[in-house]
Image (cartoon, rainbow, N blue to C red):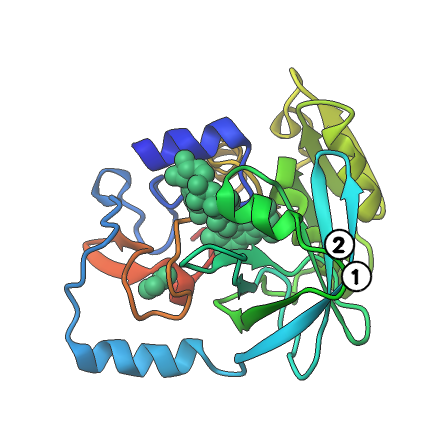
């Protein structure tokens, strides 16, 4: 519950999996967070770790530039040998002075560059936003499961910092329509990163304007994802949970789906409605 409240207040990059998902039979009451539990045998951890780490690398890379985008910071890193992965996948970024890395979605990936859009909501994100050109930081990724791109009528639906993975996603899908919601016109400056975007400002919500008949790919605060889930039968939703390792080893992101504990960093963060 605390996790859900914290996420809702800050607008969120991705929804919290404390809410019911529509995987399988999707029993809402049975879908509970179990952060910090480690119920699986070690063998299971090792197997899944290998799978989720497939293609991921850890590197120390250089900051090329930072740029303000409304209240957010666009952090441009030298990509080095890292692959950008699929839109919706994420990297663990080592924030200066913080013990644990912070998960961030790939926002843009032009040749040689990895770009992240960051909302400075706490010590880790503020430290990342305070980096300067020439600084170096440890980066691990790409991690997790991103959006499935073989969709016929894509519509991107996002809110707040939830737009972070959309510039890269839009590029991969050929600039489909996007419906983006923000709390103010200052926050809505981030919409400039997403082509073909219709912007909605509060108190209007994106879900009030969402047309039917699309393959919805959504990222944003939990209440928005919940509303999308209620309105569309088929959608890909990017959820969020606190993540300490990002590759299946710590169970910090574990949630229960249909009575089975699953790690969002391995099975998600993008999950499909049934
Ligand atoms: C897969 C994934 C991709 C993400 N992509 C982005 C991105 O592209 N851009 C971006 O700005 N942010 C992104 N986030 C969120 C970002 O990782 C967190 O905001 C960040 O880790 C917070 O660290 P902090 O030290 O600044 O704040 P903290 O002090 O750690 O957190 C501030 C508040 O937010 C809560 N919180 C922190 N992390 C989470 C979380 N993951 N879920 C729910 N509540 C949380 C804390 O409980 C606390 O109340 C992503 C998260 C995930 C899981
Ligand atoms: S298992 Fe460590 S963050 Fe998912």
User: Residue 247: x percent and y percent?
Assistant: 40, 70
Residue 245 seen from this side: yes
**Which residue carries the number 1 mark?**
171
Q: Quadrant of residue 48?
A: bottom left
User: Residue 42: x percent and y percent?
Assistant: 18, 78
Residue 233 seen from this side: no
Q: What is the total number of numbered labels drawn onto the structure image?
A: 2
Q: CA distance from mark 2 to mark 1?
A: 6 Å
Q: Is residue 184 above or below residue 125?
A: above
Q: Is residue 112 above or below residue 261?
A: below
Quadrant that contains the N terminus: top left
Q: Quadrant of residue 28?
A: top left
Nearer to us in this view, 198 or 248: 248
Residue 32 got which mark?
Answer: none
Nearer to us in this view, 139 or 233: 139
10 Å neighbourhood of mark 2: few (<14), some, or many (≥20)? many
Give the residue displayed 62% in from the left and 69% down from the top: 86
User: Residue 133: x percent and y percent?
Assistant: 77, 61
- Circles 2 and 1, Cβ within 8 Å, touching? The answer is yes
Residue labelled 1 has its Cβ within 8 Å of some atom of ligand 1? no
Give the residue displayed 26% in from the left and 46% down from the top: 33
Give the residue displayed 60% in from the left and 75% down from the top: 60
10 Å neighbourhood of mark 1: few (<14), some, or many (≥20)? some
Q: Is residue 261 left or right of residue 61?
A: left
Residue 167 got which mark?
Answer: 2
Nearer to us in this view, 203 or 129: 129
User: Residue 264: x percent and y percent?
Assistant: 38, 58
């Amino acid at each position: 519950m605390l996790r859900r409240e914290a996420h809702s207040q800050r607008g969120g990059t991705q929804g919290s999996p404390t809410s019911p998902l529509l995987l399988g039979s999707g029993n809402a009451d049975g879908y509970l967070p179990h952060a910090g539990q480690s119920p699986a045998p070690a063998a299971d951890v090792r197997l899944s770790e290998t799978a989720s780490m497939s293609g991921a690398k850890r590197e120390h890379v250089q900051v090329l530039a930072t740029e303000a985008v409304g209240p957010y910071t666009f952090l441009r890193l030298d990509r080095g040998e890292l692959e950008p992965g699929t839109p919706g996948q994420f990297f663990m970024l080592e924030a200066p002075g913080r013990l644990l890395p912070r998960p961030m979605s790939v926002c843009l990936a032009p040749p040689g560059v990895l770009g992240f859009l960051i909302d400075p909501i706490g010590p880790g994100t503020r430290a990342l936003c305070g980096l300067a050109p020439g600084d170096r930081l440890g980066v691990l990724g790409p991690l997790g499961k991103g959006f499935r791109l073989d969709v016929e009528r894509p519509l991107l639906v996002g809110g707040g910092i939830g737009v972070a993975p959309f510039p890269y996603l839009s590029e991969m899908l050929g600039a489909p329509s996007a419906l983006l919601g923000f709390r103010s016109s200052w926050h809505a400056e981030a919409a400039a990163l997403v082509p073909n975007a219709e912007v909605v400002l509060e108190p209007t919500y994106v879900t009030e304007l969402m047309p039917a008949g699309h393959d919805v790919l959504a990222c944003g605060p939990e209440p928005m994802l919940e509303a999308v889930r209620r309105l569309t039968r088929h959608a890909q939703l990017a959820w969020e949970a606190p993540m300490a390792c990002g590759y299946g080893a710590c169970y910090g992101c574990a949630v229960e789906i249909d009575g089975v504990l699953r790690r969002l960093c391995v099975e998600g963060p993008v999950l499909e409605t049934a």
